[in-house]
Image (cartoon, rainbow, N blue to C red):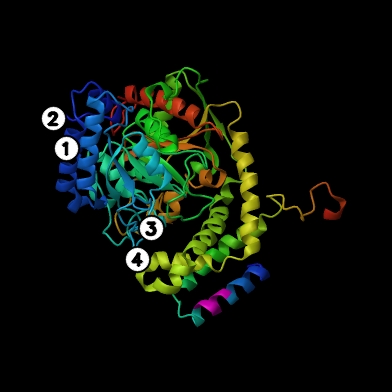
């Protein structure tokens, strides 16, 4: 898992447990997989800060 | 009443000719509700007294020569997310209901058209599900098999139609909640283009994904109801003409046909063959990035739903169905940057669907990958793999909530398992009337070919 998503998940799980919502943890783990896919798709979705394929900075 | 009308248009024609009164038709519907509501649970609130009064007024107006059009005196049901003065808006929840002081604009429009509202229909709690397994009023049962779900979230709207309890239904659709129960029950369900019917006065699930739309016994009935909901004008001369279509369709095979149960695949294949034999040109197309649909959808629907429910969760968390509550809590963990990321991605997906529609009248695909699932099931088996029920039910519909393209589910036959299936047709943005024309022509073709469950083409 990407470090940023792992960090998000750890923080979210800690908060859910602190609120007594342990049943939320499996759902957060599922959401983390979706989040990772979405963030990995930044290039696919032409995020404006991502270097374009023909940008020399991309190499 | 000698013989029940088979469709809204047939009922309207008989009312206009005064062969049938609004009171007779409304009483027949109320009788069906009384006989069937306990077993199938499509209605939360039955508005019998008001419906009888409205029907009597409709008959008086018609007798005096003030005929408003095909919806005048027509019994209609309304999903219990929509505000109607004098009735609580329960959202099928134990959370305290809204007590509206104004009708939602869609109700004002329907009343202007002369509709008779027979009641508020059952749904998945707060529209946040596809099965009605989570509702304060008992799961809605599928009329074709009472052990199965009627889909959702607008389940009651679909079942009320099938059971003759009304002749049109108002539903909402955030990820498929009109089209899914339509497919599960064998009726027609239209999600118009985004914003065509105002959602003011409707309890939101996800404001940038929510759509209001009709469920009906056939496409032409849906078209009449769509116009009435949109602007209060239901007119036969506004029905979309079937003649100005190119008879070219495209099937977005990658992703959308990857996970289908055997019955759905078989029926869809037969429909495609029937259309090709009927001189339609049916090509294959890809929708770029469609495989990311669910990820984009989740990162929009979850935070938008949580925004509306945050104040209610603070006070009434224990009143929600546990599963709904947990999904709403999930939304509070979506980071703002990822919500914006998803909103950016939806623009890309919107252009992907536009590109797929180039040169064709509509996209053609199944409305739902599976038959109506067993009540209480959390997974369903497809080709030996277990798929989560909610995710698989949303798989083919949710993209068009993201992009706002109009989409309609049309029943297309019964599979070997005895359960109905539906096709979904998706039209160009701003082209709901054209989509209805395309769908009407295809419905006519299918009734002559593969066969259809649900009402006649009327």
Cα distance between the residues tagged 4 and 2: 40 Å
Which label was assigned to residue B96? Answer: 4
Q: Which is nearer the N-term, disc 1 or disc 4?
A: 1
Q: Is residue B428 left or right of residue B266?
A: right
Specify whether disc 4 shares its chain with disc 2: yes
What secondary structure is marked by label 4?
loop
Residue B109 occupies quadrant: top left
Residue farthest to the left, as pictured = B2
Image position, residue B437 (x, y; %): 45, 25
> What main secondary structure does the magenta stretch of the protein show?
helix
Cα distance between the residues tagged 1 and 2: 8 Å
Which residue range is magenta in the image?
A12-16
Image mark 1: chain? B
Image mark 3: chain? B
Point out the image quarter for the N terminus of chain A.
bottom right
Residue B452 occupies quadrant: top left
Residue corresponding to mark 3: B379
Q: Nearer the viewer, residue B179 or B367?
A: B179
Image mark 4: chain? B
Q: Is residue B284 left or right of residue B113?
A: right
Give the residue drawn at x 50%, y 55%: B206
Q: Which is nearer the N-term, disc 4 or disc 2?
A: 2
Q: Are marks 1 and 2 in contact (CB under 8 Å)?
A: yes
Q: Which is nearer the N-term, disc 1 or disc 3?
A: 1
Residue B443 occupies quadrant: top left
Residue corresponding to mark 1: B28
Q: Which is nearer the N-term, disc 3 or disc 4?
A: 4
What secondary structure is marked by label 1?
helix
Specify whether disc 1 shares its chain with disc 3: yes
Was residue B348 drawn as part of the magenta stretch in this picture? Answer: no
Q: Is residue B428 left or right of residue B217?
A: right
Residue corresponding to mark 2: B1
């Amino acid at each position: 898992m990407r470090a940023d998503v792992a960090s998000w998940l750890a923080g979210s799980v800690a908060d859910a447990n602190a609120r007594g919502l342990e049943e939320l943890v499996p759902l957060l783990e599922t959401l983390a997989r979706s989040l990772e896919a979405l963030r990995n798709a930044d290039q696919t979705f032409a995020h404006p800060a991502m270097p374009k394929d023909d940008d020399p900075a991309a190499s | 009443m000698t013989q029940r009308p088979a469709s809204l248009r047939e009922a309207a024609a008989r009312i206009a000719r005064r062969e049938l009164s609004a009171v007779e038709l409304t009483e027949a519907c109320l009788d069906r509700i009384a006989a069937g509501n306990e077993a199938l649970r499509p209605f939360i609130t039955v508005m019998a007294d008001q419906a009888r009064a409205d029907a009597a007024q409709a008959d008086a107006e018609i007798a005096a020569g003030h005929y408003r059009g095909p919806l005048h005196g027509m019994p209609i049901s309304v999903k219990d997310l929509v505000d109607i003065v004098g009735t609580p808006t329960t959202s099928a929840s134990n959370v305290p209901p809204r007590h509206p002081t104004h009708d939602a604009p869609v109700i004002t429009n329907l009343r202007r058209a002369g509709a008779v509202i027979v009641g508020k229909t059952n749904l998945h709690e707060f529209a946040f599900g596809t099965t009605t397994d989570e509702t304060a009023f008992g799961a809605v049962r599928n009329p074709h098999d009472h052990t199965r779900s009627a889909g959702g979230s607008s389940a009651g709207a679909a079942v009320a139609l099938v059971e003759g309890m009304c002749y049109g239904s108002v539903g909402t659709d955030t990820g498929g909640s009109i089209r899914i129960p339509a497919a599960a029950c064998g009726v027609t369900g239209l999600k118009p283009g985004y914003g065509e019917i105002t959602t003011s006065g409707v309890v939101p699930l996800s404001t940038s994904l929510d759509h209001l739309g009709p469920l009906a016994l056939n496409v032409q009935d849906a078209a009449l109801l769509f116009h009435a909901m949109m602007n209060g004008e239901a007119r036969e001369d506004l029905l979309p003409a079937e003649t100005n279509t190119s008879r070219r369709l495209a099937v977005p095979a990658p992703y959308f046909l990857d996970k289908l149960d055997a019955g759905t695949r078989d029926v869809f294949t037969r429909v495609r063959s029937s259309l090709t034999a009927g001189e339609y040109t049916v090509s294959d197309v890809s929708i770029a990035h469609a495989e990311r649909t669910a990820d984009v959808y989740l990162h929009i629907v979850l935070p938008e739903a949580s925004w509306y429910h945050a104040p209610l969760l603070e006070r009434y968390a224990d009143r929600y169905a546990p599963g709904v509550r947990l999904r709403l809590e999930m939304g509070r963990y979506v980071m703002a940057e990822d919500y914006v990321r998803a909103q950016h991605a939806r623009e890309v997906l919107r252009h992907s669907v536009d590109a797929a529609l180039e040169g064709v009248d509509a996209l053609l695909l199944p409305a739902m990958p599976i038959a109506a699932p067993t009540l209480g099931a959390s997974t369903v088996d497809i080709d030996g793999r277990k798929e989560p029920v909610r995710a698989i039910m949303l798989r083919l519909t949710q993209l068009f909530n993201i992009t706002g393209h109009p989409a309609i589910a049309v029943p297309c036959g019964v599979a070997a398992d005895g359960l109905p299936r539906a096709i979904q047709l998706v039209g160009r943005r701003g082209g709901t009337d054209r989509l209805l024309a395309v769908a009407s022509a295809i419905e006519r073709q299918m009734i002559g070919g593969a066969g259809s469950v649900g009402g006649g083409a009327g």
